Image (cartoon, rainbow, N blue to C red):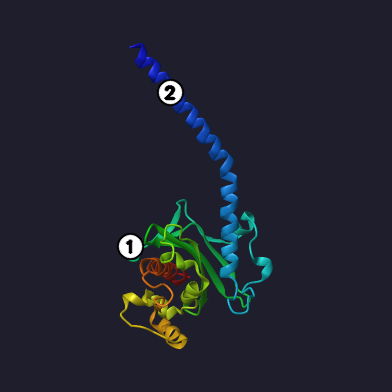
Amino acid sequence: MGNYVKTGLTLMVFTLVVGVLLAGIYVLTKAPIEKADLSNQLKAMKTVLTDPESGKFIVPEQQIPTSTAQLEKMVWRKTDNETVFSSSVWKGFIYNPVYHILSNEGKEIAIVSGAASGYGGNVKILASFIKEGNGFDLYRLEVMDYSQETPGLGAKISEERVKERFFDFSSGSLTKGLKVDKDTGIGSLSSPEAINGAKKDGVVYVSDLMTGATITPRAVTNAINTMTEYLSAEWGDE
């Protein structure tokens, strides 16, 4: 009986010590992690508000957020949950909050972060959409998290030349639902003109840059399609 009590007390002390250590580690790492997450978010937001060709901001530079307080002023849609919206069609979701800002020309811009399931986990992106007439265009995106995708295959989604294939889709293409080329059967495209032409039909051509990888770019298109579904309802109600 004494041995059982001794063993129980030993386990209790061990559990208590481990709990205290874990709590201490959490306290020590919480602030640096939050700071790093904020830095990454601000950097990505800056990227999606920059013209990829000229390198100039598409919004007044003084409006680019550099702190949490400035981000809060840009909040457009927010809920009490981690996500604002999830799509039963595209199996993607949108994180809280959704941001809003005006371009240099006074056009509305929505900045949305979302994700969809990739090869090893969720692939998270941040994208900017510009309202145009009764619709909106996808302007630019940044890949925020692809940590569980296969190195040399799906992980190529973070390369600039790959991300550029998702830039600049018009409202007409978006409403059809974007698809990667391997899901459409369009075959091989060899010229930039043909690749850009496929965008009109909502096709993102990545086979030449991501040979053997379909699941990861499909996750990005599903995340974009989820954002399109959400914004169609939000901007359509205004």
Q: Mark 2: which amino acid?
A: Met
At x 41%, y 65%, the residue is 154
Judged left or right of residue 98, residue 179 is left
The outermost residue toward the right is 62
Foreground of the two, 137 or 115: 115
**Which residue corresponds to mark 1?**
88
Question: x and y percent of residue 217 in the render?
Answer: 40, 69
Residue 194 visible somewhere in the drawing: yes
Between 193 and 34, which is closer to the camera in this rendering? 193
- Furthest-top residue in this view: 2
x, y percent for residue 191? 44, 87
Please tell me whether residue 147 is drawn above or below residue 176 in the rendered image: above
Q: Position of residue 78 (x, y in %)?
A: 50, 57
The residue beneath circle 2 is 12
Nearer the viewer's eye, disc 2 or disc 1? 2
- Residue 129 seen from this side: no
**Amino acid type, mark 1:** Ser
Residue lying at the far left of the rendered structure: 185
Q: Secondary structure at mark 1?
A: loop
Q: Secondary structure at mark 2?
A: helix
Q: Is residue 183 left or right of residue 198?
A: left
- Within 10 angstroms of label 1, few (less than 14), some, or many (20 or more) residues? few
**Image position of 134 with respect to 225: above or below:** below
Residue name at image x 38 percent, y 20 percent: 8
